[in-house]
Amino acid sequence: MVDNASSESSNQTNQNQQDPQVMSTQQVGKYTVKVINDKCIGAASCVAIAPGTFELNEQNIAEIISQTGDTPDMQLLGAQSCPTAAIIVTDNETGQQVWPVE
Ligand code: SF4
């Protein structure tokens, strides 16, 4: 006698993998942001705009805490808010610097 109970494995939930809302903001990151420490004066406007990306350390210098903690727009706005242009934003896809514009 043969027991066929082990052949039922077709009812898996593979369709859940394509959720468009998840894919829109949490990829590897559209941009890479960097802080030039020598230029940072601790004004903290970047932290106010993009707190998931920037944080002030004990020396009042902005540090990057995540490359995907805010939307790309917020990262860019945070960089543009810096009074000393201490934040460099690079597009990961093209490799081009998008801020500051030279
Ligand atoms: S806005 Fe510019 S100067 Fe201010 S903390 Fe951020 S990087 Fe530093």
Image (tube, helix red, strand yellow):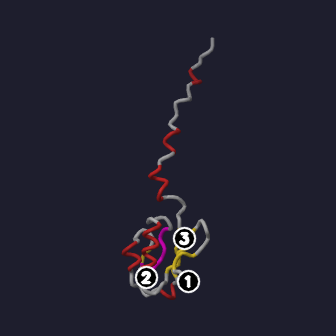
Q: Which of pointers 3 and 1 indicates the residue nearer the eye? A: 1
User: Count the marks: how many?
Assistant: 3
**Percent from the top left, x then y, of residue 89?**
53, 75
Secondary structure at numbered mark 3 = strand
> Answer yes or no: do the residues labelled 2 and 1 have beta carbons within 8 Å?
no
Nearer the observer, 23 or 67: 23
Instruction: Give the class, few, some or many, for how many residues have Cα within 10 Å of label 2's Cα (few <14, many ≥20).
Output: some
CA distance for labels 2 and 1: 16 Å
Q: Quadrant of the N terminus?
A: top right
Three-letter amino acid code at the position of disc 2? Cys
Three-letter amino acid code at the position of disc 3? Thr
Quadrant for ligand 1?
bottom left
Residue marked by disc 1:
102
The rendered magenta stretch, by its main secondary structure, is classed as: loop
Q: Does 5 lie within the magenta span? A: no
Span colored in magenta: 56-66
Q: Looking at the image, is 102 positioned above or below residue 19?
A: below
Secondary structure at numbered mark 1 = loop
Secondary structure at numbered mark 2 = loop
Question: Which residue is located at x 59 percent, y 24 percent?
Answer: 7
Residue marked by disc 3:
32
Three-letter amino acid code at the position of disc 1? Glu
Lower position in the chain sequence, tag 3 or tag 2: 3
Question: Which residue is located at x 59 percent, y 18 percent?
Answer: 4
Lower position in the chain sequence, tag 3 or tag 1: 3
The picture quadrant where one finds residue 83 is bottom left
**Percent from the top left, x then y, of residue 102?**
56, 83
Question: Which residue is located at x 52 percent, y 58 percent?
Answer: 27
Query: Residue 11, which numbered label?
Result: none
Query: Residue 82, which numbered label?
Result: 2
